[in-house]
Amino acid sequence: MKNAIAFLFLFVSFLGFSQKIKLKDGVILVDKVEYIKLREDKVSRRCYIISNLKGEDILYIKGMDYYDPAEVKPTTPGYYSDGKVFYFEVLSADLNTIYFENRPSGSPFNSLYTENTISNLFNGEAINSDGTLNLEKLEILSKKIGFEFSKKRDAINNQRSNNTIIIKEEPRRSGVNINIGR
Protein backbone atom coordinates (compact mmCIF):
# COMPACT_ATOMS: atom_id res chain seq x y z
CA MET A 1 0.00 0.00 0.00
CA LYS A 2 2.86 2.37 0.82
CA ASN A 3 4.44 1.64 -2.56
CA ALA A 4 1.19 2.43 -4.35
CA ILE A 5 0.87 5.78 -2.55
CA ALA A 6 4.51 6.65 -3.32
CA PHE A 7 4.02 5.74 -6.99
CA LEU A 8 0.83 7.80 -7.17
CA PHE A 9 2.62 10.79 -5.60
CA LEU A 10 5.47 10.53 -8.13
CA PHE A 11 3.05 10.19 -11.03
CA VAL A 12 1.06 13.27 -9.98
CA SER A 13 4.25 15.29 -9.45
CA PHE A 14 5.48 14.41 -12.97
CA LEU A 15 2.17 15.55 -14.41
CA GLY A 16 2.50 18.85 -12.58
CA PHE A 17 5.93 19.60 -14.05
CA SER A 18 5.25 18.71 -17.67
CA GLN A 19 4.52 21.50 -20.10
CA LYS A 20 1.78 21.52 -22.70
CA ILE A 21 3.44 22.64 -25.92
CA LYS A 22 1.15 23.52 -28.82
CA LEU A 23 1.50 25.18 -32.19
CA LYS A 24 -1.27 27.62 -33.08
CA ASP A 25 -1.07 29.89 -36.13
CA GLY A 26 2.74 29.68 -36.20
CA VAL A 27 3.11 30.58 -32.51
CA ILE A 28 4.40 28.08 -29.95
CA LEU A 29 2.33 28.12 -26.79
CA VAL A 30 3.78 26.69 -23.58
CA ASP A 31 1.05 26.16 -20.98
CA LYS A 32 -1.19 28.46 -23.07
CA VAL A 33 1.32 31.34 -22.95
CA GLU A 34 2.95 32.59 -26.18
CA TYR A 35 6.62 31.60 -26.20
CA ILE A 36 8.17 31.87 -29.68
CA LYS A 37 7.22 31.68 -33.35
CA LEU A 38 8.01 28.69 -35.53
CA ARG A 39 7.74 28.58 -39.30
CA GLU A 40 8.83 26.10 -41.90
CA ASP A 41 11.72 27.13 -44.11
CA LYS A 42 10.36 27.28 -47.63
CA VAL A 43 13.81 26.80 -49.18
CA SER A 44 15.01 23.69 -47.33
CA ARG A 45 13.08 20.52 -46.68
CA ARG A 46 12.43 19.55 -43.02
CA CYS A 47 13.92 22.81 -41.71
CA TYR A 48 12.34 25.38 -39.42
CA ILE A 49 13.04 28.94 -38.34
CA ILE A 50 12.51 29.99 -34.72
CA SER A 51 11.86 33.67 -34.15
CA ASN A 52 10.84 35.71 -31.15
CA LEU A 53 7.35 37.17 -30.89
CA LYS A 54 8.58 40.35 -32.63
CA GLY A 55 9.48 38.24 -35.70
CA GLU A 56 13.28 38.43 -35.36
CA ASP A 57 14.99 35.15 -36.29
CA ILE A 58 16.93 33.68 -33.37
CA LEU A 59 17.53 29.98 -34.20
CA TYR A 60 17.37 27.59 -37.13
CA ILE A 61 16.37 23.92 -36.88
CA LYS A 62 17.80 21.79 -39.66
CA GLY A 63 16.62 18.25 -40.39
CA MET A 64 19.44 15.79 -41.05
CA ASP A 65 19.65 12.05 -41.61
CA TYR A 66 22.16 9.26 -42.12
CA TYR A 67 22.08 5.54 -42.86
CA ASP A 68 22.67 3.18 -39.94
CA PRO A 69 22.70 -0.55 -40.80
CA ALA A 70 21.77 -1.35 -37.18
CA GLU A 71 18.47 0.52 -37.67
CA VAL A 72 17.27 -1.79 -40.47
CA LYS A 73 14.58 -3.73 -38.63
CA PRO A 74 11.49 -5.66 -39.62
CA THR A 75 8.41 -3.47 -39.33
CA THR A 76 5.75 -5.86 -40.61
CA PRO A 77 6.19 -9.32 -42.13
CA GLY A 78 8.15 -8.96 -45.34
CA TYR A 79 8.94 -5.24 -44.86
CA TYR A 80 11.93 -3.55 -43.26
CA SER A 81 12.70 -0.01 -42.18
CA ASP A 82 15.19 1.66 -44.49
CA GLY A 83 17.79 2.28 -41.76
CA LYS A 84 17.63 6.08 -41.93
CA VAL A 85 18.14 7.91 -38.66
CA PHE A 86 16.58 11.37 -38.66
CA TYR A 87 17.54 14.14 -36.23
CA PHE A 88 17.51 17.92 -35.88
CA GLU A 89 20.49 20.24 -35.61
CA VAL A 90 19.82 23.48 -33.73
CA LEU A 91 21.87 26.27 -35.30
CA SER A 92 22.31 29.98 -34.84
CA ALA A 93 20.17 32.21 -37.07
CA ASP A 94 23.22 32.95 -39.26
CA LEU A 95 23.82 29.15 -39.64
CA ASN A 96 27.43 29.44 -38.43
CA THR A 97 27.13 27.67 -35.05
CA ILE A 98 25.59 24.29 -34.28
CA TYR A 99 24.40 24.29 -30.67
CA PHE A 100 23.07 20.75 -30.24
CA GLU A 101 21.27 17.85 -31.93
CA ASN A 102 17.91 16.41 -30.96
CA ARG A 103 15.59 13.57 -31.92
CA PRO A 104 12.26 14.64 -33.43
CA SER A 105 9.02 13.84 -31.66
CA GLY A 106 6.20 11.91 -33.27
CA SER A 107 6.03 11.72 -37.03
CA PRO A 108 6.64 14.32 -39.74
CA PHE A 109 2.88 14.43 -40.23
CA ASN A 110 2.46 15.57 -36.62
CA SER A 111 1.51 19.22 -36.12
CA LEU A 112 4.55 19.77 -33.89
CA TYR A 113 7.42 17.59 -35.10
CA THR A 114 9.94 19.77 -33.24
CA GLU A 115 8.32 19.40 -29.80
CA ASN A 116 11.39 17.76 -28.17
CA THR A 117 13.62 20.58 -29.37
CA ILE A 118 11.22 23.32 -28.22
CA SER A 119 10.81 21.58 -24.86
CA ASN A 120 14.60 21.43 -24.38
CA LEU A 121 14.95 25.13 -25.24
CA PHE A 122 12.18 26.01 -22.78
CA ASN A 123 13.36 23.78 -19.94
CA GLY A 124 16.98 24.84 -20.46
CA GLU A 125 15.87 28.51 -20.33
CA ALA A 126 17.85 29.17 -23.52
CA ILE A 127 15.37 31.80 -24.71
CA ASN A 128 14.68 34.73 -22.39
CA SER A 129 11.15 36.03 -21.78
CA ASP A 130 11.86 39.03 -24.04
CA GLY A 131 12.69 36.66 -26.94
CA THR A 132 16.46 37.04 -26.92
CA LEU A 133 18.88 34.15 -26.67
CA ASN A 134 20.53 33.42 -23.35
CA LEU A 135 23.89 32.27 -24.73
CA GLU A 136 25.20 31.05 -21.38
CA LYS A 137 22.20 28.77 -20.87
CA LEU A 138 22.34 27.71 -24.52
CA GLU A 139 26.00 26.66 -24.11
CA ILE A 140 25.10 24.66 -20.99
CA LEU A 141 22.22 23.04 -22.86
CA SER A 142 24.60 22.27 -25.74
CA LYS A 143 26.99 20.50 -23.38
CA LYS A 144 24.16 18.52 -21.76
CA ILE A 145 22.49 17.34 -24.96
CA GLY A 146 25.56 17.16 -27.17
CA PHE A 147 26.09 15.71 -30.61
CA GLU A 148 25.32 12.00 -30.33
CA PHE A 149 23.89 11.70 -33.85
CA SER A 150 26.81 13.25 -35.74
CA LYS A 151 29.28 11.25 -33.63
CA LYS A 152 27.51 8.02 -34.52
CA ARG A 153 27.19 9.08 -38.17
CA ASP A 154 30.93 9.86 -38.34
CA ALA A 155 31.78 6.52 -36.68
CA ILE A 156 29.69 4.64 -39.26
CA ASN A 157 31.26 6.59 -42.14
CA ASN A 158 34.78 5.98 -40.78
CA GLN A 159 34.01 2.29 -40.41
CA ARG A 160 32.92 2.15 -44.04
CA SER A 161 35.97 4.09 -45.26
CA ASN A 162 38.40 1.88 -43.32
CA ASN A 163 37.43 -1.21 -45.31
CA THR A 164 40.35 -2.24 -47.48
CA ILE A 165 39.73 -3.68 -50.91
CA ILE A 166 42.49 -5.90 -52.21
CA ILE A 167 42.70 -6.35 -55.95
CA LYS A 168 44.78 -9.32 -56.91
CA GLU A 169 46.57 -8.85 -60.16
CA GLU A 170 47.67 -12.02 -61.86
CA PRO A 171 50.70 -11.85 -64.10
CA ARG A 172 49.97 -12.31 -67.77
CA ARG A 173 51.06 -15.62 -69.11
CA SER A 174 53.00 -15.62 -72.29
CA GLY A 175 52.05 -17.98 -75.06
CA VAL A 176 48.88 -19.00 -76.80
CA ASN A 177 45.92 -20.67 -75.11
CA ILE A 178 44.23 -23.24 -77.31
CA ASN A 179 41.13 -25.11 -76.24
CA ILE A 180 40.55 -28.30 -78.25
CA GLY A 181 37.44 -30.33 -78.00
CA ARG A 182 34.79 -27.73 -77.53
Image: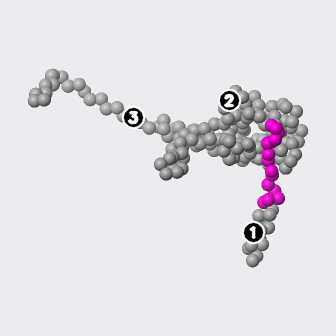
Q: Residue at x 68, y 42 (%)?
A: 109
Q: Within 10 angstroms of label 1, few (less than 14), some, or many (20 or more) residues?
A: few
Left or right of 145 on screen, residue 56: right
Query: Residue tagged by mark 2?
Result: 44
**Which of the 4 image quadrants contains residue 149?**
top right
| Disc 3 versus disc 2: nearer the observer | 2
Q: Reading the chain from its start, which is encountered first: label 2 or label 1?
A: 1
User: Could you say which disc has been placed on residue 7 in the image?
Assistant: 1
84 and 112: which is toward the camera: 112
Mark 3 secondary-structure assignment? loop
Color scheme of the displayed model: one colour
| Viewer can see residue 134 | no
Q: Residue at x 60, y 38 (%)?
A: 65
Left or right of 71 on screen, residue 111: right
Where residue 150 sits: x, y (%)? 61, 40
Distance (Cα) linking label 3 and label 2: 37 Å
14 and 133: which is toward the camera: 14
Mark 2 secondary-structure assignment? loop
Mark 1 secondary-structure assignment? helix
Q: Reading the chain from its start, which is encountered first: label 3 or label 2?
A: 2
Q: Within 10 angstroms of label 2, few (less than 14), some, or many (20 or more) residues?
A: few
Query: Residue tagged by mark 3?
Result: 165
Residue 87's place in the image compared with 171, above or below, is: below
Magenta-colored span = 14-28
| Disc 2 versus disc 1: nearer the observer | 2
Q: How many numbered circles does the render carry?
A: 3
Residue 175's place in the image compared with 71, above or below, is: above
Taking the magenta stretch, the answer to whether it contains residue 141 is no
Q: Reading the chain from its start, which is encountered first: label 3 or label 1?
A: 1
Distance (Cα) linking label 3 and label 1: 57 Å
Where residue 159 sits: x, y (%)? 50, 40
Q: Within 10 angstroms of label 3, few (less than 14), some, or many (20 or more) residues?
A: few
